[in-house]
Image (cartoon, helix red, strand yellow):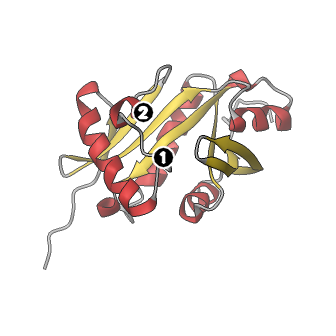
Amino acid sequence: MSEPRATAVLRPREAGDLPRCAAVLRAVHKADGYPRNWPADPAAWLATAGQCAALVAVLDGEIVGHAALTPGTARDTAAARWAARTGRDAAETAEVGRLFVAPTARGLGLGARLLAAAGAAAHERGLHPVLCVRDGDRAAVALYRRAGWTDTGTAREDWPDGPVTLRCFAGPARADEPA
């Protein structure tokens, strides 16, 4: 009989975590094709300029998940869709991104926990969480819907390797946030 696994801990990402996060990202890329275009410098891709928060999931002492939060702008597809739906400013959003869980740690609810923690971090900053995902990523779309995120539709973007259809979502509102 195998021993039960320890409960995962979510904590802020530290600079020293980036090499392990990049290794986990490599495993995710091999398993799922995320990210679609492998970055030349995965650690830099994970720690993009302007991030206002980044979290890791740690299980049995190993990093097994990641999520980041970046302030939204009118140029961001998810933020622009949310602004159009609500009549508010896209700058009132924070985009959840770089969200992934190691293939070996799936089925433990870590994606949902990271998503909720990133949404809470956005709300703590007075921002509304939003995100985009490739439309064909059924597992991610199902996760966002289960978590109560609102599907705000699709948008087509031209990426360096060709066009892609994105599905956009807006997270649940804060209790004190206008509808």
| Residue 156 higher or lower than 46, as above or below | below
Residue located farthest toward the bottom when viewing the structure as drawn: 1
Q: Position of residue 32 (x, y in %)?
A: 44, 61
What residue is at 62 percent from the left and 62 percent from the top? 136
Instruction: Inspect the image, locate mark 1, and give the three-letter code of the amino acid beneath it.
Output: Asn
* Local crowd size for mark 1, using a 10 Å CA cut-off: few (<14), some (14–19), many (≥20): few
- Mark 2 = which residue? 45
Whether residue 60 is visible to the viewer of this picture, yes or no, is: yes
| Residue 11 higher or lower than 9, as above or below | above
Q: Quadrant of the C terminus?
A: top right
Whether residue 171 is visible to the viewer of this picture, yes or no, is: no
- Which label was assigned to residue 166? none
Residue located farthest toward the front when viewing the structure as drawn: 161
| Residue 95 higher or lower than 136, as above or below | above
Instruction: Inspect the image, locate mark 2, and give the three-letter code of the amino acid beneath it.
Output: Trp
What residue is at 42 percent from the left and 59 percent from the top? 109
Q: Position of residue 57 (x, y in %)?
A: 33, 45
Foreground mark, 2 or 1, reads 1
Q: Position of residue 84 (x, y in %)?
A: 84, 34
- Mark 1 = which residue? 37
Secondary element type, mark 2: helix
